[in-house]
Image (tube, rainbow, N blue to C red):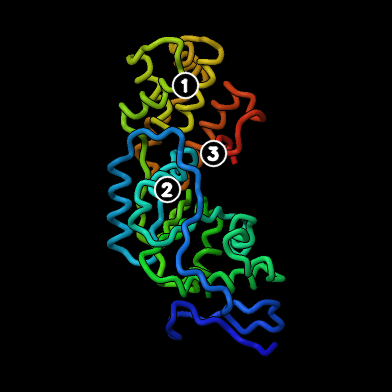
Amino acid sequence: MPQFGIWVGGEKNIGYIANVENLHYDPYKETITALKMDVDRPSTFFGRDDELLRLDTLLDEHENVLLLNGIGGIGKTTVAKEYYHRYATKYDSLIWLDYRESLFDSFMSKKMQSYFHIIKLAQSAEEAFMGVVKTLSQIEGNNLFVIDNLANINDFIKYERYLPKNWKYLVTSRSNIEEYETLYLDRLDEESAKKLFYKYYKVEKDDETLSRIFQRVAYHTLTIEMIAKSYNKSKEKLSKAYNDLEKLGINLCDIEVRVEHNIDAQKEIKHTIEKYLKFIFDTSTLQDKETLILK
């Protein structure tokens, strides 16, 4: 098979992926007019209506990439999934990509293979990436591509220019990327935090003590959920939960107000929450999504 390359975005001045010899499939054969990947909708979602509206506005106003940024466990993936479902009808095509070690590796996932058969024919992650890029560039309409939990910023910056320009990209990440328009996901509001907590905690209702707990943990979404589950399981009152926080010296209020775009503050919150979660939980029993902030 002769050498060839793939022009991305339909115009030669946008970007070019280098020639690759001996491709084992023809990426021009697979034609997809539209697709909508299945993604589980969050079973629990409180508040965040303003953030969802702002997210939608920014995606409309800015072409290509929008970054949804925030510390681990604050709810970035949950918000992105809720947006994916709540605003699904405005998009002709929707793709959800769980980021792995690299963008190439992410494209090789079994889920991507189930939608893009050319990936199975590729003999390398680079070939798979090239094939999917070409296919996506042929899909017309208002399209959204979500890349969740981006860990390697430089990897994305390196290959973002090759992604088709006829798609909008929503990227969730704990890292701030100055090159892209960013929506910072802040803490839950008081009422939403209470609804989340009482969904899992049924021992008693003590709003005054609960508010003091929220202040101690800076309304951190995952921590609120885990405290509720833990103390509900042990049938202990909220005063015990607050006393445990106080004994450990857990107080994120001062950190929370200066965390946006501050890597040191984000690390400080991460380490403090890790200390607390390890105190109240056997972390080996946590689900994958609940251990994200411990990584």
Q: Are marks 2 and 3 in contact (CB under 8 Å)?
A: no
Query: Which is nearer the eye, 180 or 39?
Result: 39
Q: How many marks?
A: 3
Q: Is residue 214 above or below residue 289?
A: above
Please state the horizontal and vertical placement of residue 288, each as a whole percent of the image. 60, 38
Q: Is residue 149 above or below residue 8?
A: above
Q: Earlier in the sequence, mark 2 or mark 3?
A: 2
Residue 106 seen in the current view: no
Foreground mark, 3 or 1, reads 1
Q: CA distance from mark 2 to mark 3?
A: 17 Å
Please state the horizontal and vertical placement of residue 99, each as a whole percent of the image. 56, 55
Q: Quadrant of the C terminus?
A: top right
Q: CA distance from mark 3 to mark 1?
A: 20 Å
- The amino acid pointed to by label 3 is Ile
Task: Please rate how many residues cluster around mark 3, counting C-alpha atoms within 10 Å: few if below 14, some from 14 to 19, many from 20.
Answer: some
- The amino acid pointed to by label 1 is Tyr
Residue 4 sits in quarter: bottom right
Q: CA distance from mark 2 to mark 1?
A: 23 Å
| Residue bearing the label numbered 2 | 80
| Residue bearing the label numbered 3 | 293
| Residue bearing the label numbered 1 | 200
Residue at (48% x, 32% y) in the render: 222
